[in-house]
Every structure is written in structure tokens, then in C-alpha cells.
Image (cartoon, rainbow, N blue to C red):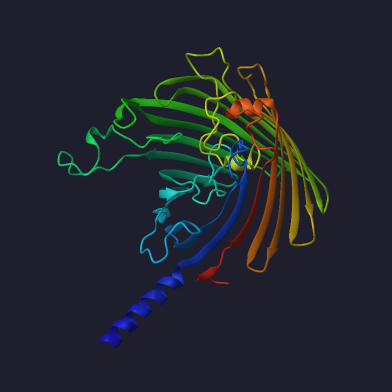
Amino acid sequence: MKRQYTLIILLVLSIQFASAQFELDGEFKPRTEYRNGFGSIIPDAADAGFGIATRLRLNAGYQTEAFKFYMSLQDVMVWGENRQLKPEDSNNSFSVFQAWADIKLGEGFSTKIGRQMLVYDDQRILGGVDWAMQARNHDAALLKYGKGKFMIDLGLAFNQDFTATTANPGGFQSAGTAYNTTGFFSYKSMQYLYAKHKGEAFSVSGLILNNGFQNFTGEADALVADGVSNLITLGTHLDYKKGNFGAAFNGYLQTGERQNSVDVSGAYLLGLDLSYKVSKGVSLGLGAEIISGNDASTTDKTEAFFPLYGTNHKFNGFMDYFYVGNHANSIGLTDIHASAKFALGETSSLLVKVLNFSGEQELGSGEKSLGTEVDLVFAKNFKGYGLAIGYSQMFASDGMYELKGITEDAAGSVQNWAWVQLTMKPKFLNTAKE
């Protein structure tokens, strides 16, 4: 009887895989970093940081004619954080990074529901933040439509804290109004509409995004939910590529309220990047970005734009001095940059990028200049894995010391950062027909 059951199970699986596709793959990404001024000016009295972190993922995808299912399990480990022979993970970093279903509804419509990455255009407002070991995900539901060169997404999200109380046997906060998770732009609700038309050389997209942020009253250790503030971000991304020339433009506005009813008015982001492929082995880039900031005389509102859930590491310098968990509600930024990428053979390249920073508004002293950053990245692909080596240095000006709250005399003489990263993405199984 057991043999018969085994044969039946194998037969069912064979029929199922004959009409469906199953993929199983993974990711192993260790990165070693030397931090001597990464993210902010390091004081002369402080020691440089050195450490190794690893991201490990196991991804499974299943697809039929009617739906797609995807799941990604993730753990982020810092070497040495766990005591040897300790049975549990000290930082509780194991998680379900993605778990979603994409169901076809017919006539170009589908819905994507669950934990997922929201990635659009150049990731300026909504991105995966893949550089960060933990990356970014959203618990959301999407209604999608696509036909030919046109697509449109309607996204909805509602976040709720869980609490097991006798008054609420369902486990959620009473009346569905409380949301106690704080942090940079952790939203209670989100709604957005994204549309894009992609042509042969020119594409244009538009985004209208509303985020509802839970307001709080009371002390830090006894916060009480008190209403919701709604922040609206809207704008467009334009992209043009023809021959060896390319151009990309971002234009976004913000209005409404930030968390705890801070009025937002006149906040904007403008960016333009040009690229030109000089030859098979050399590509050049030139660009500028202006992000509005606060005028020191403005006290009843903010004019500072914040790029919310974008992959900010790829913008404004790899050392993450701006808009990576920092620089919110500050003096804004003017970023003028130039880059050159050299192909060093078929499988390797060298990127050189120089960025000059200044505030969009003046600091208290009247200073605007912040400094210059130089980024170098060497990348090489091998059979089955890739290796990248980076070095960055910040040449801070007087304004940067003032912005980061440290005097030049107290700061270290050199502000730099170096890293080495290995990326391996093994393909374990794929039942797709050749």
C-alpha cells in the first residue's frame, strides 16, 4: 500500500510540474567593511570600525497559467555576534523577506498580494535598497494592469501592531486606530498610483503617493496614538536613450503633513543625469540633483523634501552622508556629480565618481558648502559569482563639520571607507522547459 501511495504522489507531482514552473535559488553575500567616517564625520578620538556581515537568502518561485507564488527567506549575520555553542540567533535577524502571490485576472489585469519589494524607475522614491543587507520590503496589495507599452499599478497598504489583549481577542489594537511602530517614515497606511508608458527611445512615468503616519502624544516610554498625518508625494520620471546618449530626469513635490502634524509646503526634488558612451570601454556621466531644505527662519512648517522609500545609497554618494536614516528636515542638498566607467576586459570594470555637495539652504553660520566625495568601485565577474571592491573618501568643508555637529579640530584628519563584497547566486532547481 505504501508503494502505491508513493507512486500516486510521484504521478501527481509529475503532472503538476508538467504544467507549472518551479524555481529554487539562493544568495550568499558577505561584505567586509572598514569604516572611518562612513555616514558621518568620525571624531579623531574614535577608533575606525571593521566588521564582516553576510546576507543569506533561499528563494522559491512557483508559476502556473493562473498565478505566480514567490517566497524568500533571509538571514543577516555579523561574524562573531553569536557566542560559540549558543543555540539561538542573537540578533533575531531571520525573517520572511518576501511572500506574495500574483494572480491573473484576465484582459491584462492581475493582483499582487503579500510581502514584496516595490521597485519603480531608478528607485528614487520606491526602491529595494538592495545595498543594505536587510533590504526593504512592504506588506501591500497591488492591482496591476499592463498592455503593450503601457502599465499602471494601484498599491494599497495598511499596517497594524499586534497585541494579545482580552478586550481584543482578534489580537489587533482597538478600533484599528493604534500603530505604535516608530521610526523614519514607518507608515500606518499607504496608497499610490503609478503609471508608465515605455517607448523605443523615450519613457515617461508618473507617481501619486500618499502615506498616513501615526501621530503620538506622551513620553517616549508611554506613547499614545493620536490621529494620522498624511504626506503626499507626486511627480514624474523621464528617461531617454538613443545610440550612445542617455538622459534621465526626476521631478517630485511633497505636500501635506509629516508625522506629528508637521506641515509640509513647497518641498521638491529635481534631478537630471546625462550619460554618453565614448567607446566600447568608456562611459561618462554628468548630473545634478537639488533637494529642498528648511530655511532657518521657517518655524511653523517644513520645506524639506525627503525621498522616502528610495534606494538612497545609489544617490548622493556611497558614503551615505545624506538621506540614509539621516538628514531629514534639514538644509536640503545640492549635488553636482561626474563619473567615468572603464571596462577592464570582458568581465571587469572600474567606476570613478566625484560628487560636490552643498546645502540647498544655508546653515546657521550662513555656510552652504559641505564638501566633496570621491567614490571608486572595481567589479569583476567570475563563473558563478562576482567580486566588488570599493573605496570612498570625503573631503569635508566647514559646512559639513557644522552640519554633523563636530569641530574640525575634533574630527579625524581622514574620513574614508573601504569594502570588499562577494556575491553568489546559485540556481538549485528550475523545471522550466528548455
Residue 216 position in % (x across, y down) = 34, 27
User: Image quadrant for the N terminus?
Assistant: bottom left
- Residue toward you, 352 or 419: 419
Tell me what residue is drawn at x 59 percent, y 32 percent: 236
- Residue toward you, 204 or 319: 319
Residue 432 seen anywhere in this rendered image of the structure: no
Tell me what residue is drawn at x 32 percent, y 27 percent: 219
Q: Judge from the rendering whether residue 282 lies leftward or rightward of residue 377; answer left or right.
A: right
Image height check: is 79 above or below 404? Answer: below
Residue 425 position in % (x across, y down) = 57, 64
Image height check: is 222 above or below 25? Answer: above
Outermost residue to the front: 45
User: Image quadrant for the C terminus?
Assistant: bottom right
Quarter of the figure with residue 397: top right
Quarter of the figure with residue 139: top left
- Residue toward you, 258 or 70: 258
Q: Judge from the rendering whether residue 104 lies leftward or rightward of residue 219; answer left or right.
A: right
Task: Give the tally of numbered discs.
Answer: 0
- Residue toward you, 142 or 170: 170
Q: Judge from the rendering whether residue 408 lies leftward or rightward of residue 61; answer left or right.
A: right
Residue 415 seen anywhere in this rendered image of the structure: yes
Residue 377 position in % (x across, y down) = 71, 50
Image height check: is 318 above or below 280? Answer: above
Outermost residue to the top: 297
Outermost residue to the left: 166
